[in-house]
Image (spheres, helix red, strand yellow):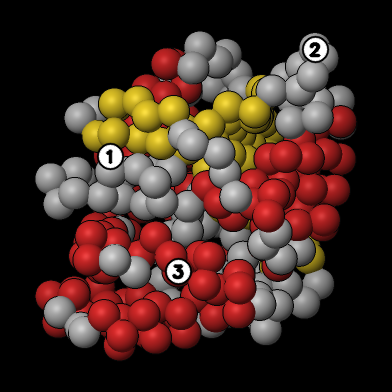
Amino acid sequence: MMTQRNSPPEPSLVTVDGAEIATWVLEPDGPAAGEVVLCHGTPWSSQIWWTAAHDLSQDFRVFLWDMPGYGASEKSARVSVDLASQGRRLAQLVHGWGLVRPHLVAHDVGGAVALRAHLMHGIDYADLFLWDVVTLDPWGSPFFRLVSDNTEVFAQLPPALHAALLKEYIAGSSRGLLSARDIDVLARPWLDGAGQAAFYRQIAALETADTRPIVARLGEVRCRTRIGWGSADPWIPCAQAYELQARLPGPAEVVELAGIGHLAPVECPSGVITAIRTWLAAPG
């Protein structure tokens, strides 16, 4: 459930790889137990992580960002929003933040972005927690694939039709656990003219050509990993969690959240927070 605490403060804007990126850093009152970077997916923004971020920031320095093309970051057509570009930007952000082996938690295509930064750009993590991630084929809901094949048509929809379609799409990620307010908040960045164009542009840019090289190198992951999944994810079946587990080196425990859909950080924030905290407290 999205609450008032999900409302982020004004971001710090940084330019990375030619794109203006909205970033946030939350600090504990006392010494930090480490650094946690949170990565979002599509069609979301860092807002899905704010409940978890506030909780984790009691003990950790927490770093959030909106990928270019999403949320409060730049959405202009000149900015590339493919997964390869986003992985390169994450690598540069980690360097810019001065982080050495942070804990990395990623959802949806954020998982592919985090894996690209790690495997293609040499960013080391203390550990990696992947939630309902887009990595293995097939991925993308039927609606996602339809839009991807007909982007120019959908981009021309009247605003009211776009809003209705978008909200139905967002609702379809859950098993009825998103409130009308949740859906409104999640849809808001995509509803003005720039947002509508950006929504369809980012879908068109997401291709399996950018995830297959990651899959080929999953055995090269250099940190301990854990996988979280909603058992009732309607977009990416939970069976993919176990296929991913089999491809990663070392023991990669799978945490299933019973009855939860694709958007676990919003549908079940307490379960996600508990799983992350248990993971972070375990000996590395």
Q: Name the residue under label 2.
A: 31
Name the secondary structure under disc 3.
helix
What type is the residue that disc 2 sits on? Pro
Q: Mark 3 points at which residue?
A: 187
Instruction: Reply above or below: 223 against 171.
Output: above
Assess whether mark 3 and mark 1 are in contact (beta carbons under 8 angstroms).
no
| Of the image marks 2 and 3, the number of the one nearer the N terminus | 2
In the image, residue 241 lies at what x, y percent? Answer: 64, 61
Instruction: Reply above or below: 211 against 16.
Output: below
| Of the image marks 2 and 1, the number of the one nearer the N terminus | 2
Residue at horizontal 60 percent and vertical 79 percent from the top: 180
Assign the N terminus to one quadrant of the image. Answer: bottom right
In the image, residue 104 lies at what x, y percent? Answer: 61, 34
On the picture, is 39 further left or further right than 82? right
On the picture, is 47 further left or further right than 87? right
What type is the residue that disc 1 sits on? Ser
Name the secondary structure under disc 2.
loop
Q: Mark 1 points at which residue?
A: 85
